[in-house]
Amino acid sequence: MLLPESALKHTDNWLVDYVVKMLLKAVVAWINAHPNAAFSRFMMKQRGPRTDVGRMNRLQRLSSALAFLLWGCLFLGLWLLIAYLTFGLGFLSPDNPVVEVLMFGLALLAGCGLIGGLYLLLRVFV
C-alpha cells in the first residue's frame, strides 16, 4: 500500500528536524567544551547594548540607555528620510512593497530603540 504524498512530506520534515536538532546540540556541546576557541568566543560575544538591567550598575545603565537612544534616533532619521523621499519629493512610490516594508521595519526599530532607551534612563534615575 502506498502512502499519501502528505505523509511522506511529514516523514521527511521529521527527519530533517531531528538532524538539525542533533547538529545544533553538537555545536553547543562543542562550544561549551572549548570556551577559548575563536568560534566559541565569537558565538558567546555580547553584541549591542546590554539588557540585563537588574545586574547593571548606574553607569552601565546610562551607557546602555544612550546606546539605545542613539540607535533609535538613527532609525528614526532613516525613517524620516524615506518618508520625505516618498511623500515629500515623490522620488519613491508609496505603493512599492519594498518601501512599505522598509518604513515598517525602520519605525519598529526606532520605536524599540527609543522606548528601550527611555526605560533604561528611567531605571538610572529611579
Image: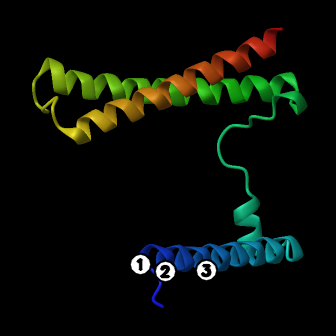
Q: Residues within 10 Å of mark 1 (few under 14, many from 20)?
A: few
Location of mark 2 (residue): 8
Residue 86 or residue 94, whichever sits in front: 94
Q: Which mark is residue 15?
A: 3
* Residue occupying image coordinates x 22% and y 21%: 84
Residue 60 or residue 100, whichever sits in front: 100
Q: CA distance from mark 1 to mark 2?
A: 5 Å
Q: Decide: is 51 above or below 76.
A: below
The answer to whether residue 116 is left or right of residue 29 is left
Residue 123 or residue 22, whichever sits in front: 22
Q: Secondary structure at mark 1?
A: helix
* Residue occupying image coordinates x 51% and y 23%: 111
Q: Secondary structure at mark 2?
A: helix
Q: Residue type at mark 2?
A: Leu
- Disc 1 + disc 2, Cβ < 8 Å: yes
Q: Which mark is residue 5?
A: 1
Q: Secondary structure at mark 3?
A: helix
Q: Residue type at mark 3?
A: Leu
Q: Position of residue 2 (x, y in %)?
A: 45, 89
Q: CA distance from mark 1 to mark 3?
A: 16 Å
